Amino acid sequence: MPSESEKSGAETTALEGAVVSPGTGPGGSEFAIVEADSGARQGGGPWAIAWRRLRRNHFALFALGVFLLIVVCCLLAPVWANQVAHTGPNQTHTLEKLHEGGEVKEVVEPSGKAIGPQFFAAGGKFFLGADGHLGRDEMVRLLYGGRSSLFIGIVAAIITTILAVVFGLLSGFYGGWTDTVISRAMDVIWAFPVVLLAIALGIVLAVGGLEIGPIHLKSSSLWIPTLIIGIVYTPYMARPLRGEILAFREKEFIEAAVAQGAGPSRIMFLEILPNLMSTIIVFFTLNIANNMLLEAVLSYLGAGVQPPSSSWGTMISEGFEALYSQPLLTIIPGTAILLTVLSVNVFGDGLRDALDPKSKVRFEARAGSSDPEAIGPV
Amino acid sequence: MLRFLVRRVLGAIAVLFAISVLVFLIFNVVPATNPAQRIAGKNATPQLIKNVEKEWGFDKSLPEQYWTQMKLIFTGEVKSYNAHINVDERIVEGIPATASLCIGAAIIWLAFGFLFGYLSAVRSGGWLDRGLTVLALIGISMPVFWLASILLYYFTYKIELFPPSGYEPLSDPGKWFSHLILPWISLAVLFAGFYSRVLRSSMLDVMNEDYVRTARAKGLSQRRVMVKHVLRNSLIPVITLFGLDFGVLIGGGAIVTESLFNIEGVGLFTAEALKQQDFPSIMAVTLFGAFFIVLFNILVDIGYAYLDPRIRLGASAA
């Protein structure tokens, strides 16, 4: 008797594990049973288990810390600008002079060479020097530029996620012609060089702005690159999600929900969606990194954030013109992108290990990046 | 095999058609500025603009304009709006530079991707694996500008080891090589990092398969098991990625690398066309690029069947 109750107890746990477990899929049930077992010992559901696993990954947590620190610094940009540097991101100081101790330094020399990093020598003014012949404060521009870059990276990732989940659910769940139409449309974007599509859209919209129905976006609006990036990456997330949904559709718990009389929206959003959460979270995180790199590419080619607004991409593009006289103007914003993207990637990697030990998402998460260039290099 | 090819080629043509329509719509229905005005110049009189409209066919209906455009591209007579150069000829001229860049970079990234991926998988969990993982993540996260700027600044300016930039034809191999080495490295780093990660996790998955245990049980050496059984079966995800990546690059996708290093290939031409919103050039370049993406997708599927006899081409889903 006791053996039987034990057995049924284990089964229930395993079943729960299979339903809610992050990363249930083909082969996921094995993991669910193992984890349910340890979960029973330590308490907590699959999310708690994932959290415990993540907490042990100090490297990933450190990366999250770095990323949050960068976000906080960029949010505090106005504080630095007003309280420390006493200037704005677009304010020029071409003819000004700095008094440091007994020395007087010109912000921009007559030759056009701007002042280098002063750190706190001038009380925080020109902490990282000035940018080229306009003599704008590099540190202030870096902080404000970070706000644009982070905004685009995060908001575009939200847009991609929402679109991908909706399209993935519709095509994976309904199948038939809905699936055919959505999948074919995705194929077209898939075969379209992502960077090229994004640049083409970016350039057209950067000149004319966007006016569709009630939406009016000025050509300098940050929302234009954000929308473009959000849309062009959608197929790379929707495709793998659709694949997972197709696999779920055959599972018993969906059959059970149908037998209970659940309608399509309840099945999609309450039964399938929770099972996709771990995949979505991992994609979302890595998507932020890819978006920030694509923003830099777009801005570099003049199809992203429009001057005089700064973003890390526009700063690199402006700095590159003076690469040999002032390499720091390229290296500083480039390093900012590298650090941010690296911290997101390291954290995303740790998140994936914690949520999805079977490493199902591993390739797909960056298969999107198959656009080589989009992802980064180009 | 034949049925597979016919179906894939028809599918490819449909995708290319859809892409050309999409590009056409982007530049004609979301009108930024009147193309006729751009050709005529800033201070053009209304009459001049009218004449240009007539000459270039902007007064025709959209489907008609689309048809003319396509006919020009495929007969090799398409002219750019701005410099009035022959676009198709310009793309063909750019192919050697783009191919040199992409093939060289691909050799570097495959060599390092395989080496690092193999070593991390074989030593998974050890310090070598951890170190290589960090390196790979840095490579993946590096913006190409950043690496390219540092390489350019240090190697061509500070220590003047390599010539600044530009492309030299292969007829002088020494010059060709010294001009391309920095672009190769910049382009290859991201891919090397990414491929080593993909190969590592793919190998780790395969290592848990039964046939690997069987191979070990038969008494095969570790190296033979890893190379013949594990590595070969881990290649599929890498091949998929390589097909997609290489297709994009060879079709002119290395836009940033080519413009940073001033390599006069298809990518640099694309960048210029985009900056000037030169619609005929953009259309031609996009079709050129999409053609390679579609072509390499088909080659990847054929590669699968070769690597894994269990995959049959006829049966694979479209």
Image (cartoon, rainbow, N blue to C red):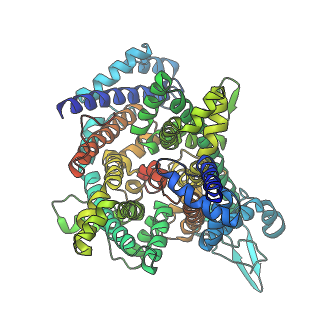
Of residues A261 and B106, the one drawn nearer to the viewer in this rendering: A261
Outermost residue toward the front in this view: A1
Outermost residue toward the left in this view: B171
User: Where in the figure is residue A92, as x and y percent of width and height?
Assistant: 71, 60
Image quarter in which the C terminus of chain B is found: top left
In this picture, is A70 found above or below B82?
A: below
User: Where in the figure is residue B167, as x and y percent of width and height?
Assistant: 28, 58
Answer left or right for B60 relative to A273: left
Asked if residue A51 shows in the view, the reply is no
Answer left or right for B110 relative to A135: left
Image quarter in which the N terminus of chain B is found: top left
Residue at 54% across, 36% down: A168
Answer left or right for B206 relative to A151: left
Asked if residue A68 shows in the view, the reply is yes
User: Where in the figure is residue A2, as x and y percent of width and height?
Assistant: 65, 59
In this picture, is A141 found above or below B89?
A: below
Where residue A282 sits, quadrant-wise, is: bottom right
